[in-house]
Amino acid sequence: MENQSPKFLKLLAHLVSYVLHPLFIPTYFFLYLMQVVPFEFASITDWQLKLKLFSVFWLTAFFPAFAVFLLWRLKFSDSIFLKTQKDRIIPYVIVMFFYWWMYYLSRNFADQPLALKYFYFGIFIASAIGLTANHFIKVSLHTMGVSGLLTAVVLVSFTYPINNLPWVVASVAIAAIVWSARMIVSDHTNKELVVGFVIGLSTQLAAFLWVN
């Protein structure tokens, strides 16, 4: 059935989908940690912290996005928006590589917050499960991303003695907004949205239990 939502609502949903794209989730989580647990970065200078933030964006957002662009331009995928399961196979493998690398770095360097270790491990597992599930169903990457973010933010409450409630509420709101946006402008079924959400949530929880 054709989506009958008003044009303004569709435009807003597209904007939400771009701003809260799954590739930006690691950068947003790092920014969040900078705000709520600044003591985890006390051993480095402000300039070094900015370089870390830039490296997170560079490795988890820019390079994967650029790789998707190249795949599209070289005719290895039909659309830059990865509309089919076939188009998503190589991008899944690419992000798996970068997420594993980020987890490896966080695990082997002492100046990395504990929350980053389980977060990176979680998104790596999520991408691996997403790749496997992609053979059967076109999992929603957006719901996978925001549910992973939401779960990671909640788990920070169990990792550090901080008042995290406002951030948890904000994360719930973000997850709800993104889910609504994808219902409006994507061709995902409810099942695909739910499966993505469950993968993001369960992998963060599993990573938290493993790392701790």
Image (cartoon, rainbow, N blue to C red):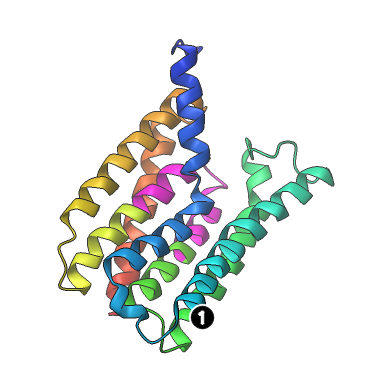
Q: Which residue is mark 1?
A: 104
* In the rendered image, the vertical position of residue 118 relative to residue 83, given as above or below: below
**Mark 1 closeness class: few <14, some 14–19, many ≥20 residues within 10 Å:** some
* In the rendered image, the vertical position of residue 121 relative to residue 202, given as above or below: below
Of residue 91 and residue 117, the one placed in the foreground of this image is 117
Of residue 162 and residue 23, the one placed in the foreground of this image is 162
**What is the x, y in percent for residue 15?**
50, 32
Residue 138 part of the magenta segment: yes
Residue interval drawn in magenta:
125-148
**What is the x, y in percent for residue 167?**
24, 53
Three-letter amino acid code of the residue under disc 1: Tyr
Residue occupying image coordinates x 27% and y 66% = 36
Q: Locate residue 39: give its quadrant.
A: bottom left
Residue 64 as seen in the image, left or right of residue 56: right
- Looking at the image, which residue sits at the far right? 74
Please tell me whether the stretch drawn in magenta is mainly helix, strand or loop. Answer: helix
Residue 108 part of the magenta segment: no
* In the rendered image, the vertical position of residue 140 relative to residue 162, given as above or below: above
**What is the x, y in percent for residue 94?**
64, 61
Residue occupying image coordinates x 39% and y 35% = 191
Residue occupying image coordinates x 46% and y 88% = 109
Picture mark count: 1
* In the rendered image, the vertical position of residue 195 relative to residue 6, given as above or below: below
The answer to whether residue 211 shows anywhere in this view is no
Residue 195 as seen in the image, left or right of residue 138: left
Residue occupying image coordinates x 33% and y 42% = 175
The answer to whether residue 80 shows anywhere in this view is yes
Residue 77 as seen in the image, left or right of residue 119: right
